[in-house]
Each structure stands twice: as C-alpha cells, then as structure tokens.
Amino acid sequence: MHLRLIYLYRNLTRNKQRTLLTCAAVALPMVIYVLSTAVVSGVDAFLDNSARQLRLAVTHKASIINMLPEGYALKIKSLDPTGERLRAACGMRWIGGKMQNVTQPLSTVAVDAEEFIKAFDDFKLTETEKAAWLRDHQAIIVGRGTAAIFGWKVGDRISIRSSVPPYTSLEFHIVSTAEHAQDANTNWCHRSYYEEDLKKNIPEATQGMVSFFFVKCGSKADLDFFRVEIDKLFARTIDETKTQDEKAFMNEFITQQFDLPRNLTILSIVTVFVAVMAATNTMSMNFRDRFNEYATLKALGFGGGYVFTLIQTESLGLCLLGGIFGALMPYVAFMHTPLGRVPVPVIQHLEIRPIVCLHAIAIAAVIGLIAAVWPSVLALRLKVVAALRNLE
Amino acid sequence: MSAADIVATSVRKVYHKDRIEIPVLDGLSLKIDAGEFVVLMGPSGSGKSTLLHLIGGLDSPTSGSIRVGEYNLERMTERELTAWRSRHVGFIFQMYHLVPVLTAAQNVELPLLLFKMSSAERRERVATALKVVGLADRTDHRPNQLSGGQEQRVAIARAIVTDPDVILADEPTGDLDAKTSEEILALLNLLNSEFNKTILMVTHDPRAASHGQRVVHLEKGVLEREERNPARPAMAAS
C-alpha cells in the first residue's frame, strides 16, 4: 500500500476511541437524516395519493374539534341531485379506541356505512366484504397494519373501548383488512352503532353530530366547484364549514398533530450542526496533539498545501466512515430485516431509497471538509521555527 | 549530490514580542566550506538555533544574506524555500520528531514522497539509509519500540535519504546518554568524511563539539571566536 494511504489509515486509527466517538457523532445525524427523509417522503406519497382521490373534507369552520350536524350530508348531496358530480357525502366521527391491556392507542373512525363504500372506492373492497360490511351493524374494517400488530383476521370478533364518551367497550366483527387502502392503520366502523351506544349510555348527550364529512366528487372540476359551493351553502349559519381537498385536509391534520416535515427538518439541521461541532473538536484536538508532526513535515520540505490536504483528507475519511455507517444502518434495518414490515402511522412503512443514503454520505463528506477548515488553516499558517522552539 | 558551501553575510534577526524588539543575531557573518563539519556553540539565547533555522530556510533574516551552494535564500519565496529544503537540506532534531504511527522504514521513506521515483527505488534508498545508520534489522519497528539512540539513527536516516548537500543538526545528542551520543557523533563523522556532507551542528556539549572540524562560538548574536580542531583537519570539497 502506498505510504500516503498507510499514513492516512494510521492517523485515523491513532486514537481509536476518539475516532469511534466522532464516527458515532457523524453517524447519528445521518441516521436521523435518512429516517426523516423517508418519513417526509412517505407523508408526501400519502398526501399525493389523497390528492388523486377527488375527495373533499368538510369540517367546522372554527376548528376540527367542533362538530357538524349529520343532516349536513343531505344538504351537501342536494347540491347535485343527479349524483354524478357529487357521488357521496360520508359523515365521520373519530372515536379513537383502546384494546384491553394494550397501551398502544388505536385510530378508529365511525362512518356512514353506505356512503363510506361510495366515497372510499379506492379501498377496493370485494363484493363479499361490501356485503358483510353493509349487512352487519357491528362490522369493522381494520387497517392491515393494525391487524398485523394484533394478529387480527377477517371473521375475528374484537372489543375496542372508545376514547370518547361514553368510553364503553364496543364489540366488532372484522369484515375486511382493507388491503388496498393507503392508510394501513385506521379502523372503520358503523356510526349508527356508535350512536346507538351513545344513546344507550348517555341519553342526554348530543347525538347526530359528526367530526367531518368526506365528499366524493366526479372530476377535478367538480372538486373545485363543490369546494366553494359547500361553504357557500352553510355560510351565515351557526355551524359554518371549511371545505378543502383531502390532501390539504390531511396535510393540515398532520401538521396540527406533529408538523412532521418542519420538525424533522429542524431536527436534521440541528444534529448535522452538532456533528460539525463534534468533528471540528476532534480535528482541533488532533491538530493540537500533532502540531510538532506538522512542523516536522514542513521542515522536511512538505508544503503547507500538503499538510492542509493531509488534515482535510483525514477529516474527510473520518466523517465518511461515520456517514457511510449512518446511512447504511437504517437502509439495512428497514430494507433487509423484519423491521421494514413494522407499520408506521400514516405512511405504512418506511422506504429508504439508496439516493437518500448517497445524499447522507455526501453531507457527511461536507461535514468532514468543514470540520477540518480551522485546523487546516492553523497548520497552513504554522511557523516551523515557533513550533519547534515550543517543543525543544 | 555534492556538498554545498554556506555563506552568511551580515545576518540580523530580530524577533518581536509584545511590541518589544528582541535582537537574536546582530550582523553575523560566517563562511562554511563545502564538506566541512562545523559546530555552533554558545550560551542559551546566543542565536545558535536561529542561525541554523535561517541556514535551513525555515526562517528569513531581518537583514543580510545567506547563500547555500548556488541558492541565495533571502531571494526565495516560502514555496521555493520549502522545495529547496526537501532537496538540499537534511534536518536532525534533538527530540527526533519521528511520526509515531509509522515504522522506521516508513519514517525514512516520508521525505521521498516529495520525489518522483518508483516504489522500488524508494525502498532501495530507504534500505541503504537504514543500513548506513546501522538499523537494517529494525525497519518494521515503530518509534516506541526503539531506544532513544535508535530513534535518532532513524531521524539521521530520514535526513540523509534524499542525499542532501547540507545536514543541519540541532543538539542531536542533547537527549542521549554519553555512550549513545558517541555513536551518533561517530555516525555524523561518517556522513561527513565518507559521504562528504556539509554538517552544521548546534551543541552545548564540549565533547560533542570535539567531533567538528571547526567550532564557532556565538555570544549575544555575534560570532565571538572560532577554533580549528587539529584532530580533525578539514577535507577538500569534492
């Protein structure tokens, strides 16, 4: 092996603990970057799919937690008596849910059964599933990811305690695991069943209210048309509406919940900044430990450029090691182990793309070059005589 | 490579510290013949090491001129001086300054990275240099596996592997015991007598000084006196 490479390798392994810790300090932000990018891409894909579904989401104008009367469904449908341009208006009420002795919360939505099938035709339920869903008051369509976690299958009877009043346990019969639904985690049950339970346990509770409506349109033009018309219809009423397409609604919902893209971007930037500081600290310590060596190299006839390059190369190598490890770790974990099959809220499962790993490695390389700037400049300016005088 | 003579003329060197001028060399003139072994002596602060560094092109004089062979150092840029050093000067330091993570052979090979030559030629030169200093059997040892004397021998091999005209040694025996010092000085004598290298050595040790052909005493930045060593007459330069 060429002496330059031997020298680089020996420099990298000179202080193994320092090298290991610095690699880890660079690797961790790269893991976060790769995972964050995968999550954001997954959310984008989810939203893009929502955009294709020609659905409008109608919520209360004040906020999503304010309820709307279920009667709005008929009024909305009256905007197109033919049912060609406005095909369904499905009232929904979020009831959450919890399994007995399981801490993980569920996402269950009570829906208008018939309208749901029309509004969510992208679920591609079979005729058997549709029939079972419409026939059975206690039918539930479970997300396939949730089904995988709990080992549920079609035909199973399950019990879910609602997270909203009356907080009772509801018995359900699984009729489908929604294999084609974009959302693999949410469960869907009959709203009439929930309303019945509510009436039985809290007779004084306000009934016939929904959290939101999903309105299925016939075309993109219809989508744009009814987005305006629905809000006009309920203008100057007690419960004014806010209508937006499904992508905008989902985006707003995700943003309100955890503002993923923004927070993950901030997290990535902060961790990369920390990695730069850690790597800079390492390279500065290396410089302090070896300035006599750099002075000797200069005395022997190596120019400042050589010493500059030597430090830059070492820093680059150090950060590339961390970057490659940090980029490949989530790739291997999520693409080549069972971890990749674990469902993730909203986005089903994480898909780590090789190009994102390459980006992470490139970022690590940039970190390496930035980290070495200050020590390299110090080495470049190092006065041999002054350095030797300090040592002898 | 043939030996080079050294001519320092009216050299002044002033350092500045906290806006105070500290004159180290004060109009010093010195001539060293090609192939001569000259010893610089003097108390601390007399300017010995500074003169050595100026002659080695590691620093520039405040005024005056220094010529080594055909090169006028004061006219050269830092880049030119660096390139010149790699080809014409071999340095030996008191603390050896070997790269601790490289073996003896790799330390000696290091300056050859600045030369365009095949790896076979490099290996041959390294083997020759280590043989000259008597360490042919220690090529794969790292500095921490060598004694102080052996480390200095490796440093000498590193200094001569490029076949320089001039060897500048700054207290090369300062960190060694008497017996090892004698061995190192004998080696420098060999480089001077057999390989015709011009050697300028700084030392405090009168016994070490007795190995030179001429001893130059500095005092407060000026040449105080010179002594010829009758036991070691100067040879004609080749």
Image (tube, coloured by chain):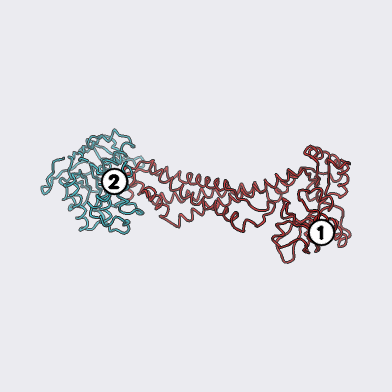
Chain letter of the residue beneath label 2 in the structure image: B
Q: Is residue A24 left or right of residue A200?
A: left
Find residue A2 and report its horizontal and vertical position in percent: 37, 48
Quarter where residue B134 is shown: bottom left
Q: Is residue A223 left or right of residue B140?
A: right
Find residue A154 and report its horizontal and vertical position in percent: 76, 60
The disc labelled 2 sits on which kind of residue?
Glu
Measuring 87% from the left and 55% from the top, which residue is drawn there?
A207
Q: Is residue A233 left or right of residue A249?
A: right
The disc labelled 1 sits on which kind of residue?
Ala
Depth check: give the residue in front, A131 or B44. A131
Q: Residues within 10 Å of mark 1 (few under 14, many from 20)?
A: many
Judge if badges 2 and 1 mark residues of a common chain: no
Measuring 25% from the left and 34% from the top, which residue is drawn there?
B72
| Residue A385 seen | no
Outermost residue on the left side: it is B230
| Residue A327 seen | yes
Q: Is residue A214 left or right of residue A295?
A: right
Measuring 28% from the left and 43% from the top, which residue is drawn there?
B53
Find residue B189 and report its horizontal and vertical position in percent: 18, 49
Chain displayed in red? A
Chain displayed in cyan? B
Which residue bears the numbered disc 2? B121
Measuring 57% from the left and 54% from the top, which residue is drawn there?
A332
Which residue bears the numbered disc 1? A139
Outermost residue on the bottom side: it is A101
Depth check: give the residue in front, A375 or A23. A23
Chain letter of the residue beneath label 1 in the structure image: A
Vertical arrangement, residue A92 with respect to residue A233, above or below: below
| Cα gap from disc 2 to disc 1, whole angstroms | 85 Å
Count up the numbered dots: 2
